[in-house]
Image (cartoon, helix red, strand yellow):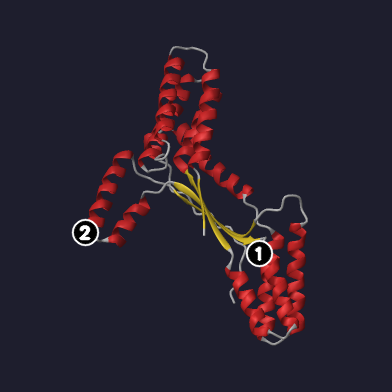
Amino acid sequence: MKRILTSIAVAGLLATNSFAMDAKTAKVSKNAVIKAEKNAQQNTQLVKEAINAIRNTQDALIYLNGKDKKNAINSLKKAIGDLAVVLNTPNPPYLLPVDINFEAYQFSGNIKTVASLVQKAKELVIANKLPQAREVLNTLRDEIVIKTINLPLVTYPAALKLSIKYINENKIKEAKEVLAMALSTLVEAKTIIPIPLVKAQNLIIEASKIVKKDPKEALKYLDEAKRQLKIGKVLGYTSTSETTYKMLKDKINHLEKEIKAKHNTSSLFERLIEKIKDFEHKSITRTSK
């Protein structure tokens, strides 16, 4: 039986769209993605006890296949003990991450490219050339994807205890079936973070920091933030929040006018940053199976 290996693989990012930005703006966008990846890794920590429990469950199956009931029971007891540590903590989570994978897909085209590719994908679908259509659609991704394999804490320990009961009753076949079923109940969860909205948020925050010292550069950051929001929109990441997208665009436009008029923009930035953070948070999708 294949063991679950703890591994974090972060895909290399494609080059930032620096042709549309100056060096400073490009650096802010690039750092935003790097920071988002690091935050995602820090917020999705693997649970050592859960990993040990699965390994001991796999060991138990190996022992049972070798008709070694004693070591099988010992392995299962170790697994139950590992999970008891988590169960005895305040507010234990329902799912325990045991494996995690990070990937980043960065769209390298411009807004006009999207329309062309979408039209091409539609034509391929109409022609029933679905594999080719999928290849085109896969290029229209600008996101960080986090995949986690999780152990369900509520049901897993009960399955281990039932398996021990069957082993003690010499029902080896039933014990193996229960363990195999328990291992098959691992839940895969996927979180998708839209990169354009991550960039837009960071650009606005950085603009707020430099606006008094360098208003021209701040305006460049805001202009690029609008472009990133537009990219997010045409790629479909804001499809459920069209009203919010328009509101953010209008607020940035207003902010740009106030900066050019040399007015105090502190409160405007504060409200905009609050809105963009909420928008970016709501744009994150989470699914499980």
Q: Residues within 10 Å of mark 1 (few under 14, many from 20)?
A: few
Query: Distance between the Cα atoms at labels 1 and 2?
Result: 47 Å
Return the x and y of residue 231 as percentages of the image width and height.
Answer: 38, 39
Relative to residue 279, is residue 174 depicted above or below?
Answer: below
Residue 64: image tag: none
Judge left or right: residue 123 versus residue 204: left
Judge left or right: residue 239 versus residue 169: left
Q: Earlier in the sequence, mark 1 or mark 2?
A: 2
Quadrant where the N terminus lies? bottom right
The residue to which callout 1 is attached is 155
Quarter occupied by residue 241:
top left
The residue to which callout 2 is attached is 127
Q: Residues within 10 Å of mark 2 (few under 14, many from 20)?
A: few
Relative to residue 176, is residue 130 depicted above or below?
Answer: above
Return the x and y of residue 29 as percentages of the image width and height.
Answer: 48, 37
Return the x and y of residue 197 as percentages of the image width and height.
Answer: 47, 38
Q: For the residue marked with disc 2, what is the amino acid?
A: Ala
